[in-house]
Amino acid sequence: MKARSMLVATLSCLGLCSSGPAISDGYYGDRERGWFWFEDPPVEAPTEDAAPAAPAMRPTVDQDQQMIDRMEALQKQVKAARARAFFEPNEENVRAMATLQTAFVRRSSDVADVWQRTIWANPEFDFTLERPVNPLGLAAYEAENQQKRANTLDHLANTHVFYYFFRSDCPYCAAFGPVLSAFSIASGIEVFPVSLDGQGTADFPNAAADNGMAAALGVTTVPALFIADPVAGKIMPVGYGVMNEADLAQRIVAIADEDQPDNVRAATPIRQLSSLQERK
């Protein structure tokens, strides 16, 4: 119902904010036909003395353009009624505005009803199948994601390692260090700590001194975390700054997801690890 209400409001707003050519008042005298009802003009009956009429030709105007013109005309009429009611707020103008807006909202409601039924009948349009919103579906979705996350981390623990860049005097590194250490223990992904000032911390006392790795990777902000595949010789950034364990898991699973489109995967830069391994 919430999604349907939002759709009604959106359609109504479009009607109130757009502009277009003027429209006649014929609908309000004959509204049971609907706004979008198109009819051929009536054909007069031939007289007895008249020659047989040629077959009526159908309109040549593109029907899509007719619909667009009619919508723009209606939107302009609503906008004009609002302007009159705003600058001349008498009963007649306000009533005219209310009549138009109410009719537009009702038409929007009809569209929303058809939209909703179309979604029900066509699963390819239903995004709640990918990300449920009701409690039962959401619980199943979260359980599936947790299992996928666990499987991904188990796989990465056997194939990947972390490169962690920090400074011993960095307060953000001091906050992130325990999180990364606990995540490493829980996930099994080993951490290679690299200190930019040559000093370790309580969580990573035996860190290697930076010998150019940070500059090679373009690290200017710490803490900085990268994930590397030594066998493939590739290293990718996970993120900068303080992250919690949930953020880490989400980012790592996303980076490791090979089912993402190529343009999405390309947004994570991949560097060659071979030269860095020699410096390690």
Image (tube, helix red, strand yellow):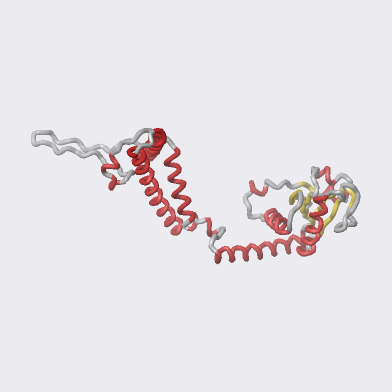
- Residue 261 vs residue 173: left or right? left
Residue 244, x across and y down, in percent: 73, 56
Residue 39, x across and y down, in percent: 27, 42
Any part of residue 88 in sight? yes
* Along the viewing direction, whichever of 43 and 204 lies nearer the viewer: 204
Where 131 falls versus 167 (above or below)? below
- Residue 189 vs residue 97: left or right? right
* Along the viewing direction, whichever of 9 and 70 lies nearer the viewer: 9
Residue at x 90%, y 56% (from the top left corner): 206
- Residue 61 vs residue 10: left or right? left
Residue 155, x across and y down, in percent: 73, 62
Residue at x 70%, y 61% (from the top left corner): 152
Labels in figure, total: 0
* Along the viewing direction, whichever of 80 and 277 lies nearer the viewer: 80
Residue 188, x across and y down, in percent: 78, 63
Residue at x 85%, y 54% (from the top left corner): 193
Any part of residue 158 in sight? no
Residue at far front of view: 90
- Residue 103 vs residue 135: left or right? left
